[in-house]
Amino acid sequence: MSASTHRTALSDGGSARNTRRFPVGGGEFPVGAAVSVLGGFLLVRTAAMDVPSSVSFLGPRFFPAVVGTLLLLLGVALAVRALLTRGSSSHDGSAESEATENTGGSGRKPLLLTAASLLAHLLLLRPAGWIIAGAVLFWGVSCALGSAHRLRDLGISVVVAASVQLAFSAVLGLPLPSGVLMGVF
Amino acid sequence: MDTLSLLGGGFAEALTPLNLLLCLVGVLLGTVVGVLPGLGTAMAIALLVPVTFRLEPTGAFIMFAGVYFGGQFGGATTAILLNTPGQSSSMATAFEGFPMAKNRRAPQALATAVLGSFLASLVAVTLVVFFSPLMVELAVGFGPPEYFALAVLAFLAVSAVVTGDVLRGMTALSLGLALSVVGIDEQSGAVRFTLGSAQLLDGISIVVVTVGLLAVGEVLHVAARSHREPVTETISSGRPWLSRRDLRRCWGPWLRGTALGVPFGVIPAGGAEIPTFLSYGAEKSLAARRGDGEFGKGAIEGVAGPEAANNATTATSLVPLLGLGLPTSATAAIMLGAFQQYGMRPGPLLFSQESDLVWALLASLFVGSVMLLALNLPFAPLWARLLRIPRNYLYAGIVVFATLGVYTTRSSVFDVLLLYVMGALGFLLRRHGFPIAPVLIGVILGPLAETSLRRAMAMSQGDPGVLVSGPFTIVIHTLVLVTVIASVVYRLRRRRTG
């Protein structure tokens, strides 16, 4: 029941917040900066790489150096374009601004819940075993995306995780960690 | 004839009960992901690669091909009934298909889509059967310079031409290339970009990258905008059928669509979207010339042409994939990655060493097309009901399946962590409007580009002239130049008019 109230709250504030948080073209500047930083990082690590002495023409450094330079230049280009478009027109309906608007902003809570489920799964997989970790993953994601019956979904999650364990271990012979439920299976 | 006897052997292999079953599973799954918007054949095959690793490769590839074909058939159903194309290659189908459905002509629209898809698949697969060996004969003489040129062609085509935005496309490609250099360098043994992590010495597995970007990234993306999904209403339809009059109107568009689609599979132009729009445009202008004003209100020609075109493109994209190892669409790139997982390299060697697999795969394409006809013609309305599956279960299932597949390939929690990191990357790329396909092409073809470049330079003792020495390299590099210039001119002209 709390899920539905949260969702309506989000959908009310969603679009308004979206336009405020992602001014057209402005979202691209940090992206460009990040791409440049990544390119610079590649170049630095390439320069610091240990290269075996036997290398002839075009050693292991050449290709990463090209890719690093590309990323650096592309990042600068993206950032410059973001600055230019922000200066000239703030509301033209170009394809890029539309893409940013369609995909940007809002829905923070479902996203965080999904990310938290992934993290919980990672932490639980070895110690608690697949059935528990898998059920947590399924339940978390299905709740994040708007579950109507949380308790019923918990049951479904356990059934899904258990039948997957059965299918993988028994039929395909692929091992999954059994964790704390070791004795049961 | 030699080809025919090889194909006969392929049929014998494809018609074994297990392979028939795998083909059926593939086409069913393909239809499902085709029908459901947001899920694509690329994602489906990426998810299947790790779990089919224990299967015989022949069976696995028969299944992948079934998914690839099934997606094209399924995409039309929801485009027509709901105006929500399940795949980007079905967008053109919705233009006339949905108005037809609103005019109570849904059965005819579905029938022309399915029959057109079937016809185009048959024609195009026949061409694949006879042209792949020719492609192989051509490719036997290819050395490192030629493969480097091909990789460059694929890079530029996918990132600069297909994507709407060159900067974003090139950035996505470079990110993919950057991912591909992580790990021990095969030629020199140098350790690259592992950040001291022993688990990264083997590099980042293609399975982890593809599943993370396509499946986990998509789920995160859906979560971030979960409440903004539009509500769709289903138009109910009867059983698909065509009257004799409709059939007469469809023949031309089917054949023209096939003819338009066939060449687009062979060149790396990013899959079936462009030919479907070309076919739609061609049918529209032909109708205008005839003085037929039905376009826009549900003209059957506008469904028949694009549907034939996208299936023809899908089929012929197997020619460069099998013959050269050159993927011309995102799904083909995933299949190439799958070949690499099995330790096979598409190209002339595949045809000589894995001849049984290749011919069984080609034969199974005919089998799969027949299955798809039988599954889609009578049951198309049933498939549309798949949209009633609660989305939260669907996406939760996808995450679980993705995690499981990646974990079981190496029993490594680190791989799962990497999978989620790739998912986060895929989410960020989608959120900022970057295309995913160039990343995939970069990761999968990056190592080929690097090794062939370095081998070529070693052969020539450091003379870069070797890269443009042979006749094929010159042809391919000219092609690269022509595509880049053509796309720049097209863009400038559009900017001026628009």
Image: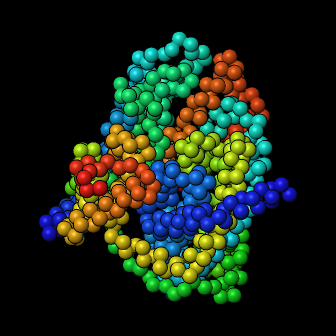
Picture residue at 27% right of the left edge, 67% below the top: A156
Residue A64, image x, y percentages = 49, 26
Residue A116, image x, y percentages = 23, 50
Residue positioned most to the front: A183
Which of the 4 image quarters holds residue B483? top right
Picture residue at 27% right of the left edge, 44% below the top: A126
Residue positioned most to the top: A53
Q: Is residue B476 above or below residue B1?
A: above
The answer to whether residue B34 is seen in the rendering is no
- In terms of depth relative to the viewer, which is nearer, B482 or B391? B391
Picture residue at 46% right of the left edge, 32% below the top: B202
Q: Is residue A142 above or below residue A55?
A: below
The answer to whether residue B314 is seen in the rendering is yes
Q: Is residue B187 above or below residue B491?
A: above
Q: Is residue B428 above or below residue A139?
A: above
Residue positioned most to the right: B1
Residue A68, image x, y percentages = 45, 28
Please give the count of numbered marks on the rendered protein. 0
Residue A184, image x, y percentages = 25, 56
Is B105 left or right of B127, judged from the image as shown?
left
Q: The N terminus of chain B appears in which quarter of the rendering?
A: bottom right
Is B175 left or right of B56, judged from the image as shown?
left
Which of the 4 image quarters holds residue B360? bottom right
Is A126 left or right of B418, judged from the image as shown?
left
- In terms of depth relative to the viewer, which is nearer, B33 or B236? B33
User: Which colour style is shown?
Assistant: rainbow
Picture residue at 65% right of the left edge, 22% below the top: B457
- In terms of depth relative to the viewer, which is nearer, A125 or B345? A125
